[in-house]
Image (cartoon, rainbow, N blue to C red):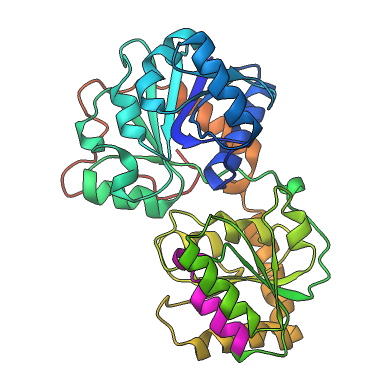
Amino acid sequence: MRILFGSAHPYMPQMYGGAQTSTHELVKRLRARGHTVGVLAGLTGEGWLGLRSRAQLKLHRRGYVRDTGLGYPVFRAWFAQEVVRRVVADFKADVAIFQSRLPVQLAQSINRDATRTFVYLRNVEDEDLGGSPSDLTKTGYIANSNFTARRFAETEGIHANVIYPMIEAEKYRVTSSRSNVTFINPHPNKGVDIALQVAEVCPEIPFVFVRGWGLTPEQEAHLQTSLARLPNVTLRPSTNDMRTIYKDARIVLAPSQWEEAFGRIAAEPQISGIPVIASRIGGLPEAVGPGGLLLSRNAPVEEWAEAVRMLWNDEQIYAAAAQAALDHAARPEMRPERQIDILLDILSRPIPLDGAHRCQEGGTSPAASPGMI
């Protein structure tokens, strides 16, 4: 098949995130199976790629640029939704899978009679969709967690098959020195204030904060002011090689304040037996499973600190949590080859033409088992 993934978000190397990483790993696995795969993405003017793309857009005047630096074609445009129909035609896509930013609008823009169309639901924020899935016909759905599938079954009445984000274990597996508590992405949505307070309450424990999303000047100033009085916290830059982060982590702290659709940041460290302490919100409980601890996102800082200290100090409890994390990471639903098998089966099925993909009235999404059909 000729398969095109599409999003209005920028893509590697301009943007690294869970959706981009999962897509990259999906593309490589699909290509290894003999399929021709490309990616449509948004574009920013930043960096060498932005400068080069700006010049190419002026030169060619076709609305998008194409590069192959990742080993496969990536089509980039300032506004992906404005060129998606042309890119689908030029790529001769048999299948289009839209996700992350404006997937509904992207799907609405193409000829779904000519190209089998799917929306991969990777978050639950309405503003990211670019429209209501209930307005789409001739479209199949995939979700990145049972939480996401249930949410759209309840709000839109659609059925989505569940495939967890793809994680290539060897890219994350480490033998950790287990010498710090790691908190990734010091952003308000990710619970940076809770992490800062826990570090303050636990001065005897070393913490590492790892940059993620960009911060506003006010958020950056707040972070720097807070860190200045916390000698037990080290701030590290973002990285594309998470092994450099996990190699020293004993615990990953994820006090997220928003509804994570899945929580890749909980799944990655578990590959190395690193337990996670996270908020009981969104898809995080699925990602953490028995391999860590879950607290209310509104739990007082003393409860977060108590959980951290327990896993930090009690070797017996820690060993059990670490083994549970390993076992949870090894479950069949997280095996890439199995995920590819399921995805290819979904892509080859007939898509209802009249909205029959919707759950029956009063029912729930059949996607009750991750990665299962």
Q: Nearer the viewer, residue 253 or 85?
A: 85
Task: Give the residues drawn in magenta, as a range.
Answer: 187-200
Q: Nearer the viewer, residue 126 or 216?
A: 216
Looking at the image, which residue is at 39% across and 19% down?
A: 83
Could one spot residue 37 in this view of the protein?
A: no
Q: Quadrant of residue 305?
A: bottom right
Q: Is residue 205 above or below residue 71?
A: below
Q: Nearer the viewer, residue 53 or 38?
A: 53
Q: Is residue 107 magenta?
A: no
Q: Is residue 69 above or below residue 369?
A: above
- Position in image of residue 266 (x %, y %): 59, 61
The quarter of the image holding the C terminus is top left
Q: Nearer the viewer, residue 212 or 264?
A: 212
Could you tell whether 39 is left or right of 135 in the image? right
Q: Quadrant of residue 34?
A: top right
Q: Is residue 110 above or below residue 139?
A: above
Looking at the image, which residue is at 45% across and 50% down?
A: 145
Q: Is residue 191 magenta?
A: yes
- Position in image of residue 264 (x %, y %): 56, 54
- Position in image of residue 259 (x %, y %): 39, 60
Q: Quadrant of residue 366?
A: top left
Could you tell whether 366 is left or right of 326 in the image? left
Secondary structure mainly formed by the magenta segment: helix
